[in-house]
Image: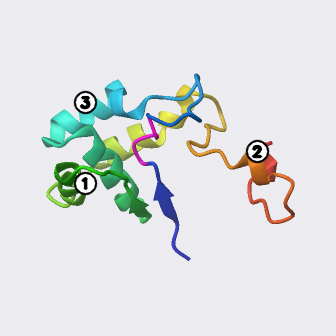
Amino acid sequence: AVVSTQSTGGNPGSVFRREDQVDLLHDEDVKEIAAKHGATVGQVLIRYQVDKGNATIPKSVRPARIDENLNVFGFKLDEADMEKLNKNYLKIGPKGYRTCSVTKWQDSPYYPFSDEL
């Protein structure tokens, strides 16, 4: 099975954005890692998912950003970077949060996140 990720940047412009949601694109830890590697914050967030073995679906409508999103193979995150990024969810709480809420389907017998309700 392959896990895919969507909204790797945290979906900052979404009308569904929660007030308690971490702003990944302006997170100091992510910015520090980006500066260390000479990469953008978006590239670090995409590379993080790639290094975790996840298929990643970044969104953009601007050609320059699309090119930037594809250029994530010129650097590799080290163990310290991965550890710091792995702990990012702790800024919200022990369970973290889902960037894209799909609770409108919570009554379905196939809803996969019932334990989070």
Overall secondary structure of the magenta section: loop
Q: Amino acid at mark 2?
A: Glu
Q: Are marks 2 and 3 in contact (CB under 8 Å)?
A: no
| Nearer the camera: disc 2 or disc 3 | 2
Pointer 2 or 3: first along the chain = 3
Q: How many numbered marks have been drawn onto this rendered protein structure?
A: 3
Q: Quadrant of residue 26?
A: top left
Q: Specify whether 86 is left or right of 63.
A: right
Question: For the C terminus, which image quadrant?
Answer: top right
Look at 22% across and 49% down and name the residue there: 65
**Residue 27 position in % (x across, y down):** 37, 27
Point 19% across, 54% down: residue: 63
Kindly report the distance in space between the C-alpha atoms of the residues bearing marks 2 and 3.
31 Å
Hey, what amino acid is under mark 3? Glu
In the rendered structure, which segment of residues is drawn in magenta? 8-12
Tell me, yes or no, whether the highlighted magenta stretch contains residue 18: no
**What residue would you read off at disc 1?**
69
Q: Secondary structure at mark 3?
A: helix
What is the basis of the colouring in this image?
A: rainbow
Tell me if label 1 and label 3 are in contact, CB under 8 Å. no
Mark 2 or 1, closer to the camera: 1
Element under disc 1: helix
**9, 47: nearer the viewer:** 9
Is 10 inside the magenta-drawn segment? yes
- Where residue 42 appears, as percent x and y from the top left, is 29, 43
Residue at mark 3: 32
The first of marks 1 and 3 along the sequence is 3
Q: Could you say which disc has been placed on residue 112 in the image?
A: none
From the image, tell me which residue sits under label 2: 116
The Cα atoms of the two marked residues, 2 and 1, are separated by 31 Å
